[in-house]
């Protein structure tokens, strides 16, 4: 296995922080995904008050909460252009992809999404830290590859294509979700159009593709660990979301899968 990975990844730097974070990233994200399947949700979006007493909790509007989630990670990506200005084209692509991803999320929060629920600060803080720490770690791990030989199999440009497919597909399905509601409408509806006719969470599917695109551009152990962990988390979240739709809407089509068309 190590020899196979060695064809795709930079040699792992002798850095304890990156090694530990690679393990922590997979374990924490995968654990959160399995908790979603068991009904223990991160409390935002439609799950903001499921199985959870919110009476004594600090609540944020969903828009403010989501803005909080993405802004520190965006600022970390933006700052990396100043902190690491001339470290090669691959590093430039990694910094650009991460910064564009979180800029898009902030843009959607401010101008695309229509919100109906709240967010508990107790849930917002760990998610914010997760995005920020993962972004900083990915950038630092890329910085540590300076001077190392390139991986034998080059994935940068397939990664750029995959990232663009992911970010465009994610934005398009977020746009479709936003069109389900009028300005003052706060009710959930069954999503239609795009891949919503096949899966409950196509926006998650494209988000996964986007992060695998970043990992292909980066080709570091940490970026692959984060992409794998994110995949497990969003598998769990999409499974829980499909179960929620089935419980709320009697006419929700049973043939619509959670994340992968015709499969899962």
Image: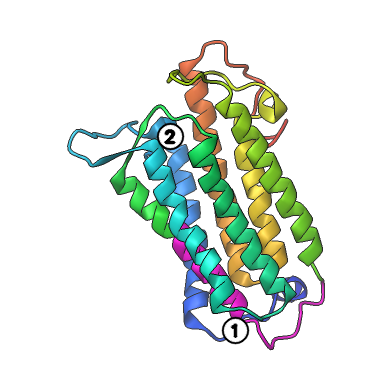
Residue carrying label 2: 45
Question: Foreground: 105 or 37?
Answer: 105
Residue 178 is situated, as x and y percent measured from the top left of the image, at 56, 28
Residue that extends furthest to the bottom in the rendered view of this protein = 147
- Looking at the rendering, in which quadrant would you find the C terminus? top right
Q: Residue at x 51, y 22 (%)?
A: 245
Q: Residues within 10 Å of mark 2 (few under 14, many from 20)?
A: some
Residue 141 lies within the magenta run: yes
Q: Residue at x 62, y 71 (%)?
A: 221
Measured from the top left, where is residue 39 in percent x and y?
A: 40, 35
Q: Residue at x 49, y 33 (%)?
A: 240
Q: Is residue 97 above or below residue 38?
A: below
Which residue position holds label 1? 13
How are the residues colored? rainbow
Q: Which mark is residue 125?
A: none
Q: Quick one: which residue is furthest to the left in this view?
A: 56
Q: Secondary structure at mark 2?
A: helix
Q: Are marks 1 and 2 in contact (CB under 8 Å)?
A: no
Q: Nearer the viewer, mark 1 or mark 2?
A: 2
- Write down the quadrant of residue 66 in the picture: top left
- Does residue 197 appear left or right of residue 37 in this picture? right
How far apart are the two marked residues, 1 and 2, measured between alpha carbons?
Answer: 38 Å
Tell me if residue 100 comes above or below residue 195 in the rendering. below
**Residue 129 to residue 199: above or below:** below
Which region shows up in magenta? 131-153
């Amino acid at each position: 296995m190590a020899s196979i990975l060695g064809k795709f990844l930079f040699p792992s730097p002798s850095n304890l922080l990156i090694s530990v974070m690679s393990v922590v990233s997979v374990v924490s994200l995968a654990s959160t995904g399995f908790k979603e399947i068991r009904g223990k949700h991160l409390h935002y979006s439609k799950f903001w008050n499921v199985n959870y007493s919110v009476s004594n909790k600090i609540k944020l509007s969903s828009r403010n909460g989501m803005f909080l989630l993405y802004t520190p990670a965006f600022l970390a990506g933006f700052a990396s252009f100043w902190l690491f200005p001339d470290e090669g084209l691959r590093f430039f692509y990694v910094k650009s992809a991460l910064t564009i991803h979180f800029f898009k999320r902030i843009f959607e929060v401010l101008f695309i999404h229509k919100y109906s629920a709240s967010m508990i600060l107790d849930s917002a803080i760990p998610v914010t830290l997760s995005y920020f720490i993962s972004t900083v770690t990915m950038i630092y791990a890329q910085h540590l590859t300076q001077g190392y030989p390139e991986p034998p199999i080059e994935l940068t440009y397939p990664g750029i294509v995959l990232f663009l497919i992911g970010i465009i597909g994610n934005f398009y399905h977020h746009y479709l979700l936003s069109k389900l509601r009028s300005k003052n409408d706060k009710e959930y509806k069954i999503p239609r159009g795009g891949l919503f006719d096949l899966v409950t969470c196509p926006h998650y599917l494209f988000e996964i593709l986007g992060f695998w695109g970043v990992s292909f551009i980066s080709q570091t152990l940490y970026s692959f660990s984060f992409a794998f962990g994110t995949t497990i988390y969003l598998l769990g979240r999409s499974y829980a979301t499909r179960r929620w739709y089935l419980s709320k809407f009697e006419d929700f089509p049973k043939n619509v899968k959670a994340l992968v068309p015709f499969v899962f």
